[in-house]
Image (cartoon, helix red, strand yellow):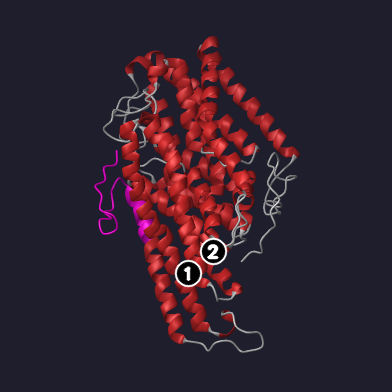
């Protein structure tokens, strides 16, 4: 029963992961009208689905980077599996709830914060609450990039900068090259460049993010004795996660798409292409090098970079500042929620405790969804000019809208 | 903390290098392609003084343009191959782009 709650919650997280991150791939494509909003999220959803199935690699050790609840081969620590693995399941459940609640809150505010940070933050918080500070792997053992510092914090600082530099260089070069070509002509060309590069980002996102949830669910299955193989993931888990992230993507986190596509920079097709290409290249190169990073940080860095690199381009630094603030507090905030959830669950204990945690999640999710209905952002208004009324809490500086190139 | 900083730095410059080659290099080729096509098409595809007919069409530009697009497509195909390969637990060696020994856990 607790296991069922964990699985449902994990899939719910996967779903929020999807709609929270649609913007990473498609915000610029939608903002430049290279694709219609619905077509863009549909394409991204399909590619996330495909990507999730491509990630055949076993991601069972996903939590190993930050917390010590698993052995290095992926099996849960023996001390946590007693009595059907209840101790471990509660940590996972509380961590997932922390991640989801933070994802929903930042979505409500239209902030592109990192879903991976939310997940890791929630897990870290729940682990600290459940096992104490020593249960968290803060710094690794010095043999490779590891721990909270090496797998989460440092990449979060470095990756947006790298993506920003690449996008800035790309944008600057493109604008130099196509100077003198008629605008109508470049618009058509870059439209395809954008669609191609955005597709690549969607695919990479599906492979990277869906497998985190697959790993978490499989860990829960092993802990409760429903699965024993640490070398593979049950097919139904794979299917469920792939579908959840694809549906989430298709739903489209319009608030975040709006911020990323319209809020930071008034983006032109050439910039969109440069930004997405930079994102795709940085994400792929990093995962190749085992440099864990957040798609969100990369995508945001790229969009900023494309604003910096465009001759006479403008960046709304105040919006960027809000985002950076959200990044900084994502990990601790999700951690606090995760810890609180663990305490609640542990205080009540057993199935009742897990149920209460789950109900808290449902209640807060419903509340935030209702709140979002007051100022809805959807495909109808996602591309409206950036102004405080529609952007919820955002208070952008008044910047003259430069003519789209 | 110290060793993580060092590892981050080591990984970061490689990511930056690969990012610049693929993430800025391919768009550069793409932009050159667009430019070539415009040169190939001539006329209103290029900015020219109002009232004049615009530059003459240059068929070779069209050819160069599509060649460049083909290179870009090959680059994208490489990217997709990379995703699929790592999904299957295999690794592509990019030694000609950036030499590195990869050990994926």
Residue B31's label in the rendered image is 1
* Residues at circles 2 and 1 in contact by the CB criterion of under 8 Å: yes
Which chain is disc 1 placed on?
B
Q: Quadrant of the C terminus of chain A?
A: bottom right
Q: Quadrant of residue A29?
A: bottom right
Q: Residue at (54%, 73%) from the top-left corner?
A: A179
- Does residue B29 appear to the left or right of A366 in the view shown? left
Q: What element does badge 1 sit on?
A: helix
Q: Compared to A51, does A99 lie above or below?
A: above
Q: Residues within 10 Å of mark 2 (few under 14, many from 20)?
A: many
Q: Which residue is mark 2?
A: A270
Q: Is residue A297 visible?
A: yes
Q: Compared to A298, does A215 lie above or below?
A: above
Identity of the residue furthest to the front in this view: A312
Q: Compared to A160, does A40 lie above or below?
A: below
- The answer to which of A76 and A375 lies nearer the viewer is A375
Q: Return the x and y of residue A385 as percentages of the image width and height.
A: 71, 54
How many marks overall?
A: 2
- The answer to which of A322 and A236 lies nearer the viewer is A322
Q: Are marks 2 and 1 on the same chain?
A: no
- Does residue A400 appear to the left or right of A166 in the view shown? right
Q: Main secondary structure of the magenta part?
A: loop
Q: What element does badge 2 sit on?
A: helix
Q: Residues within 10 Å of mark 1 (few under 14, many from 20)?
A: many
Q: Quadrant of residue B71?
A: bottom left
Q: Return the x and y of residue A108 as percentages of the image width and height.
A: 65, 37
Give, as a single range, the part of the protein colored magenta.
B77-105
Q: Is residue A256 visible?
A: no
């Amino acid at each position: 029963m607790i296991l069922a709650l964990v699985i449902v919650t994990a899939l719910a997280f996967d779903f929020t992961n999807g709609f929270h991150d649609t913007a990473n791939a498609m915000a610029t494509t939608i903002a430049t009208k290279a694709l219609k909003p619905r077509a863009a999220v549909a394409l991204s959803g399909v590619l996330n689905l495909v990507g999730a199935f491509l990630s055949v690699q076993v991601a069972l050790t996903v939590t190993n980077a930050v917390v010590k609840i698993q052995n290095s081969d992926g099996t849960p620590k023996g001390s946590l599996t007693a009595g059907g693995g209840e101790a471990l399941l509660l940590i996972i459940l509380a961590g997932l709830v922390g991640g989801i609640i933070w994802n929903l809150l930042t979505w409500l505010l239209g902030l592109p914060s990192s879903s991976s940070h939310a997940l890791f933050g929630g897990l870290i918080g729940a682990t600290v609450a459940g096992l104490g500070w020593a249960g968290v792997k803060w710094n690794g053992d010095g043999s490779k990039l590891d721990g909270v510092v090496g797998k989460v914090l440092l990449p979060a600082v470095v990756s947006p900068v790298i993506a920003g530099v690449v996008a800035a260089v790309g944008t600057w070069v493109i604008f130099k090259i196509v100077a003198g070509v008629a605008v109508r002509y470049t618009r058509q060309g870059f439209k395809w460049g954008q669609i191609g590069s955005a597709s690549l980002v969607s695919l990479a996102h599906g492979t990277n993010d869906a497998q985190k949830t697959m790993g978490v669910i499989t860990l829960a299955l092993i802990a409760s004795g429903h699965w024993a193989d640490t070398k593979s993931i049950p097919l139904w888990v794979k299917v469920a996660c792939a579908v959840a992230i694809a549906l989430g993507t298709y739903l489209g986190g319009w608030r975040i798409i709006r911020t990323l596509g319209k809020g930071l920079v008034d983006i032109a097709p050439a910039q969109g292409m440069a930004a997405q290409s930079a994102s795709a290249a940085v994400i792929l190169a990093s995962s190749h090098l085992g440099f864990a990073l957040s798609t969100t940080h990369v995508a945001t860095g790229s969009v900023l970079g494309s604003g910096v690199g465009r001759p006479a381009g403008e960046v709304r630094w105040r919006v960027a500042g809000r985002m950076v603030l959200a990044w900084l507090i994502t990990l601790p905030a999700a951690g606090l929620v995760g810890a609180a959830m663990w305490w609640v669950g542990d205080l009540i204990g057993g199935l009742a405790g897990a149920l209460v945690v789950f109900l808290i999640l449902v209640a807060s999710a419903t509340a935030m969804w209702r709140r979002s209905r007051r100022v809805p952002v959807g495909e109808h208004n996602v591309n409206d000019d950036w102004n405080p009324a529609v952007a919820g809490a955002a208070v952008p500086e008044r910047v003259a809208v430069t003519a789209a190139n | 903390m110290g060793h993580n900083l060092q590892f981050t730095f080591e990984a970061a410059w490689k990511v930056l290098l690969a990012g610049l080659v693929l993430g800025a290099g391919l768009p550069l080729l793409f932009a050159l392609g667009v430019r070539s096509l415009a040169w190939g098409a001539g006329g209103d595809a290029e900015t020219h003084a109002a009232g004049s007919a615009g530059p003459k069409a240059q068929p070779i530009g069209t050819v160069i343009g599509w060649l460049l697009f083909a290179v870009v497509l090959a680059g994208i195909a490489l990217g997709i191959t990379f995703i699929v390969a790592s999904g299957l637990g295999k690794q592509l060696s990019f030694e000609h782009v950036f030499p590195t020994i990869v050990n994926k856990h």
